Image (cartoon, rainbow, N blue to C red):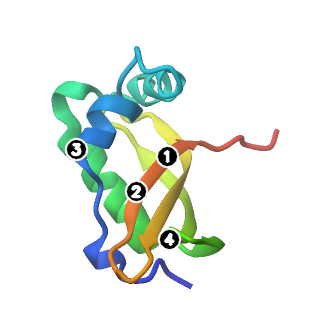
Amino acid sequence: MRLPNARFAVVPVEKLLHYLLDERHPTGQHKARIFRSVGHSRNHIGRLRRDLLELASSNMATLDSTTRFGEKWRVSGVLVGPNGGVLRVRTIWIIPRHEFVPQLVTAFPERTSA
């Protein structure tokens, strides 16, 4: 199954600037270093935003949970960074209750099996 309404998905710029690409964020700093290692930076967030939206619409999705806030969906895939680096990531999206637009919650590197 695909992420419902993926064509309407939203990746808030603030989520990228102040979390996923912020090397000073208490929980996002490690993610920021990994995204930076494949060429993503706070100066050029458009590419990461587009790549995350493409990942959401072109990969299979799994419903992880339904909470009082809405449905949480997991979508995994591969991102190719601006420097050509390859990163396998898992993204989490929420479709808030009584809404239909998926919103990015987080993205993080997936472990690869050796």
Which mark sits nearer the N-terminus, 2 or 3? 3
Closer to the observer: label 3 or label 4?
3
Which mark sits nearer the N-terminus, 4 or 1? 4
Q: Which amino acid does label 1 sit on?
A: Ala
Q: Which mark is residue 13?
A: 3
Q: What element carries label 2?
A: strand
Q: Is mark 1 on a helix, strand or loop?
A: strand
Q: Which amino acid does label 2 sit on?
A: Leu
The count of marks equals 4
- Residues tagged 1 and 2 counted as in contact (Cβ below 8 A): yes
Q: According to the image, label 1 marks what residue?
A: 107
- Left or right? Give the position of 5 relative to 71: left
Q: Which amino acid does label 3 sit on?
A: Val
Which mark sits nearer the N-terminus, 3 or 4? 3
- Residues tagged 2 and 3 counted as in contact (Cβ below 8 A): no
Taking the spot 53% from the left edge, 22% from the top edge, the residue there is: 30
Asked where in the image residue 43 lies, by quadrant, the reply is top left
Vertical order, 110 against 10 (above or below):
above
State the image coordinates of residue 101 (x, y, percent, origin top left): 32, 75
Asked where in the image residue 56 lies, by quadrant, the reply is bottom left
Which mark sits nearer the N-terminus, 4 or 2? 4
Give the distance between the C-alpha atoms of the residues marked 4 and 2, in whole angstroms.
15 Å
Which mark sits nearer the N-terminus, 1 or 3? 3
Q: According to the image, label 2 marks what residue?
A: 104
Taking the spot 43% from the left edge, 73% from the top edge, the residue there is: 95
* Residue 40 visible within the image: no
Closer to the observer: label 4 or label 2?
2
Q: According to the image, label 4 marks what residue?
A: 59
Q: What residue type is labelled 4?
A: Asn
Give the distance between the C-alpha atoms of the residues marked 1 and 3, in whole angstroms.
14 Å
